[in-house]
Image (cartoon, rainbow, N blue to C red):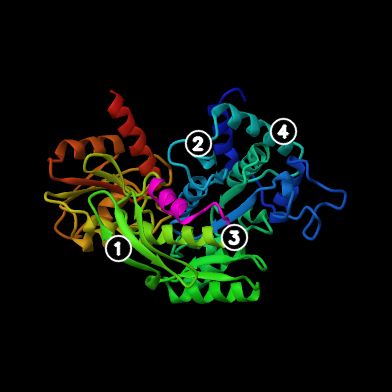
Amino acid sequence: MNTCKEAEDYILSIPKFAGKHTLEDTKGLLRRITGEDTASGGGAGTENAAGSPGAFGIRSKIIHIAGTNGKGSVCAYLRSMLMAGGCSVGMFISPHLETMRERICFGNDMISGEDFLRVFEKVRLAVSKEKFHPSFFEFLFLMAMVYFKEKKPEYVILETGMGGRLDATNCVEKPAVCVITEIGYDHMQYLGGTISEIAGEKAGIIKKGVPVVFVDKRKESTEVLAEYAKKAESPTIIIGKESILNVNINHKSIDFSLHSGYYSYVSLSLNTTALYQTENAALAVAAAHALGEERVTPEAVRRGLWEAFWPGRMEEVLPGVYLDGAHNEDGMEAFLNTAGHISCEGRRLLLFGALTDKRFKAMIRMAADSELFDEVVGTVVETERSASVRELEEAFEGRGKMRCSFYEDAERAYRYLLAEKKEKDVVYVAGSLYLIGQIRSLTRRMCHD
């Protein structure tokens, strides 16, 4: 491969030929790629057990994050606070919005095109000698770990791709802290049809004696997470409704207070209008405290939270135009809650696109029942998994008094809404992270035309 585009095309083609294998297979491959394989095979219990000093040649302290919604935001807040304290940080996240390189970061910068191609080739060469081929997500995780071994950050933040128990990132057997964000209905075909079953899969990242931070939002998930933590003898820090107080939404920011049995912050500020980010910020602060990192002082916490940025989460890309990555029912509920709190003297207009493997009909029902929007434009997202115009039309039929129209092309739909928008109107884009990435790229091109 000679270009990043060719490397990305190869990675995108992986689902067509990757076969089934176990997490132990992935661990073994990672050891061989990083040169950390041992004569005994380097299995669990050896000196090179994942997460212990020198694991896979990576001496960083690892923060492992799972959950349904909010994982990426928690990653961003943690990274920002650690960096505000002077710590070096690597981060592996998913999905990406515009380029695959977003998934692998050192500091605030995504991996360069040159480094992406180089670590890709290293992993591809190693994989060519194996009896199995890693999945799309595993391949990118292997690339990230190779990169982090080279860069030697003090901390590595790993976000699970889906679930936790069988996720490739669960190669790490002894992280410094585990975080589990809000758990809701998503990927049920893989994780189970109940909140308890889904929570059990997410709880698979909990390790013996390792502190775990999670949010108390649903009784079913809280009970499962608490039981797993108890069995693992893991200290727990739980963020509940009583932890986040005095929330005040300003024109472009949110102020709030954070309290727990371990610490108290009377005044914190987030540079966003997304109400749901107070919960994600609280989880990140609790995780930072669990690390026991002395450099993350109260001032570093405050500055890190304020300076943190995570794209596509109630992101204002043009005056009065917001992109939000709501792509499941819980995400839609959080989005609608925030949209209802943002002052609007004119009309609220919504551009909506979704994937068929999401419960998009329920999301549409929620949007309609909110009665927030004067007009909704449904569109097809640039992926074969997108809901069609016909499916969107059927889902919106008879839903409220909103004016509805539909477009096969998201660019035409977006340009229509921008032309329709009056000075005091507000435009929102939601329903799919694929759509958010597409509209972000389009907005950038339009601004440079």
Query: Neighbour class for label 1 at 10 Å: few (<14), some, many (≥20)?
Result: some
Q: Dot 3: what SS? A: strand
Task: Report the front residue among 45 and 351.
Answer: 45
Q: Identify the residue under disc 1.
A: 247
Point out the stretch of residues depicted in magenta: 292-307
The x, y position of residue 357, in whole percent, is 43, 54
Question: Disc 3 or disc 4, which is closer to the eye?
Answer: 3
The x, y position of residue 116, in whole percent, is 59, 32
Q: Identify the residue under disc 3.
A: 177
- Any mark on residue 109, and which? 2
Q: CA distance from mark 2 to mark 1?
A: 31 Å
Q: Dot 1: what SS? A: strand
- Any mark on residue 154, and which? none
Lower sequence index among marks 2 and 3: 2
Name the amino acid, label 3. Answer: Val
Question: Disc 2 or disc 4, which is closer to the eye?
Answer: 2
Q: Identify the residue under disc 4.
A: 125
Lower sequence index among marks 2 and 4: 2
Q: CA distance from mark 4 to mark 1?
A: 52 Å
Name the amino acid, label 2. Answer: Asp
